[in-house]
Image (spheres, grey):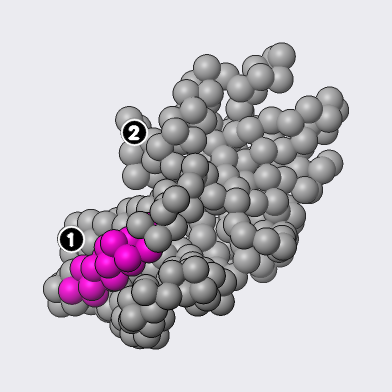
Amino acid sequence: MPDANDDSTSASGAPTDFNQRIIDEFRARHGRVGGFFEGARLLLLTTTGARTGARHTTPVGYLPDGGDRVLVIASAGGSPRHPDWYRNLLAHPHVTVESGVFTYEARAVVLTGADRDRAWERAVAGDPGWAAYQEKTTRVIPVVALHEIPREGPPRIAAGSPGEAIKVVHDAFRRELALIRDEMANADASGRAGLGAQLRVNCLTFCQGLDRHHTGEDQALFPFLADRHPQAAPALARLAAEHTHIASLVGELRNAVTGDPATARAEVERLTRALEAHLTYEEEELIPLLDAP
């Protein structure tokens, strides 16, 4: 879905009341918002003012693009002028991104030429609303890649305890799985309106996020817990073994969502339920250990 509101600030530089309500709800509900933007792909983008140097936070729509980047589109609802956040990042490309679960620093790069055109085509395939905005303006709507800047140490997760952090991350994966099922259920056999591309995007977001999550558990969390809770060794060994199986299921899911929606729905249902069962088992085993006194 296109941007919540590209023109994010009032004349004083503060977020508009409309945007502030979205920001507050987004943070309180770990990336979920209701109303018109229910189910929308939103992130919070914090930029540095080009003229003032002040920090400004804006809710914007995004497009997963694999690897270490996501795409944001400076549509401004088809306005003849670029949104404030876009002008800010031209002057100061170092930005902060909040996904609702993770907060990270990123480097903003404006795409040009064929790279921009390919990204634009993917965005329009996922949501024709972007094309409608382009038709309203003579300016070429910019597409910006936000490249995550690697950091040392654990990720910054919006949670008050290690156990809550696991639950928050898992709930984000559950939302992705539910979205995949819903989109498959609503697709017809032709997959019209760019459904196939949208499903692949959903899977890409989920698959890459899950892979990173499991890598962190295998390399850091499980050895930490095994050292402090030897009695949990069998459960931790099972979880580590399941991660290999989960990677295989994710590959099957990726193939399923790119197939014929009329025949793939049952397979998508089976795979997403299996992945959810893994998340539930992991919570049952890990949260008591992580939140133990």
Front residue of this view, candidates 16 and 149: 149
Q: Which residues are magenta?
A: 270-287
Residue type (three-letter) at the residue carrying disc 1? Ala
**Residue 189 in view of the camera:** no
Q: CA distance from mark 2 to mark 1?
A: 21 Å
x 78%, y 48%: residue: 93
Identify the mark at residue 134; answer none if there is no mark. Answer: none
Q: Give the residue type at disc 2.
A: Gly
Q: Which residue is mark 1?
A: 185
Q: Position of residue 289 (x, y in %)?
A: 40, 60
Image position of 42 (left or right of 104): left
Q: Which residue is mark 2?
A: 34
Depth check: give the residue in front, 255 or 210: 210
Residue 230 at what x, y percent from top left? Answer: 42, 75
Residue 24 x %, y %:
49, 28
Give the vertical position of 151 relative to 226 (above or below): above
Q: Secondary structure at mark 1?
A: helix
Magenta stretch: helix, strand or loop mostly? helix
Q: Residue at x 27, y 57 (%)?
A: 178
Between disc 2 and disc 1, whose residue precedes? 2
Q: Is residue 8 visible?
A: yes
Badge 2 crowding class, 10 Å Cα cut-off, few under 14, some 14 to 19, many 20 or more, is few
Q: Relative to 198, is 19 on the left or the right?
A: right
